[in-house]
Image (tube, helix red, strand yellow):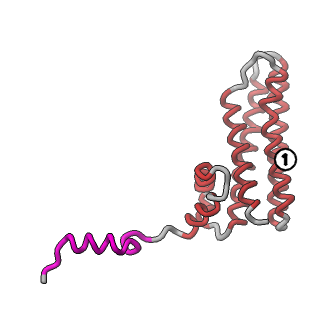
Amino acid sequence: MASSPSFFFLLLLVTPSLASPPPPPSTTLIQTTCSLTSNYDFCVAALRSDPRSLRAKDVKSLSAIALRIAVAKAKTTAAYAASLAKNATEVAASRSAFGTCAEKYKNAGEALRWALGSLAQENYDYACVHVGAAQEYASTCGRLFIRRNPGMAFPAAMAKREDELQRLCGTAFDIISQLG
């Protein structure tokens, strides 16, 4: 009896596990972990942006990766704010506000490094406290700028960085919360 192409097609439909291999364990870990966060798509994109996440073995290692991503964002945002302070041509208040923002982002980075230390010691409550502090440091920049510069718009590029760091902190917080 000759085999027909439709028989093979039917066989593929009946046995989907043979047609497509299962996702790698790290992908499944990322998806499962991110499904328990407040922003699944952002979480997946953030973790996949770091190649170390593809080698993660557990939620704790994904937590550390999320924190390191946030530390890097805090560092680059602090440098960006410092450059805005240095190059500001507007009123002195905006130079001062950007300088203060740079300090706040440095503080956020330090708080996130403390969170990494707490995570390593499996002190998840303190890790969450430090992440919360970092998130608060990040949120003060825009408010501070507007208070010191009434009528001036907060630069969109700075607002975008602020939002991204807050979201990274929120993602790290959500992942760490799965551990305790």
Q: Position of residue 158 (x, y in %)?
A: 70, 32
Tell me the residue at 68%/41% (across/down).
164
The chief SS type of the magenta part is helix
Asked if residue 81 is among those painted magenta in the image, a careful observer would answer no
Can you say which quadrant of the picture contains the N terminus? bottom left
Q: Is residue 17 magenta?
A: yes
Of all residues, the one furthest to the left in this rendering is 1
Question: Residue shown at 82%/42% (left/top)?
Answer: 136
Q: Which SS class for mark 1?
A: helix
Q: On the picture, is 135 further left or further right than 36?
A: right
Task: Evaluate whether residue 22 shows in this view.
Answer: yes
Q: Quadrant of residue 10?
A: bottom left
Relative image position of residue 75 (x, y in whole percent): 75, 44
Tag count in the figure?
1
Q: Nearer the viewer, residue 83 or 43?
A: 43
Residue 25, horizontal then vertical, whole percent: 56, 70
Residues packed near mark 1 inside 10 Å, few (<14), some (14 to 19) or many (20 plus): some
Residue marked by disc 1: 133
Amino acid beneath label 1: Ala
Residue 67 visible in the shown view: no
> Compared to 151, does 19 lie above or below?
below
Nearer-the-camera pick, 148 or 100:
148
Residue farthest to the bottom, as pictured: 1
Q: To which quarter of the image does residue 122 belong? A: bottom right
Q: Quadrant of the C terminus?
A: bottom right
Figure check: 16 above or below 118: below
Please give the name of the residue rendered at 76% of the width and 32% of the height, measured from the top-left corner: 81
First to last magenta residue range: 2-21
List x then y, in percent, for residue 34.
63, 58
The residue depicted at 62 percent of the width and 58 percent of the height is: 35
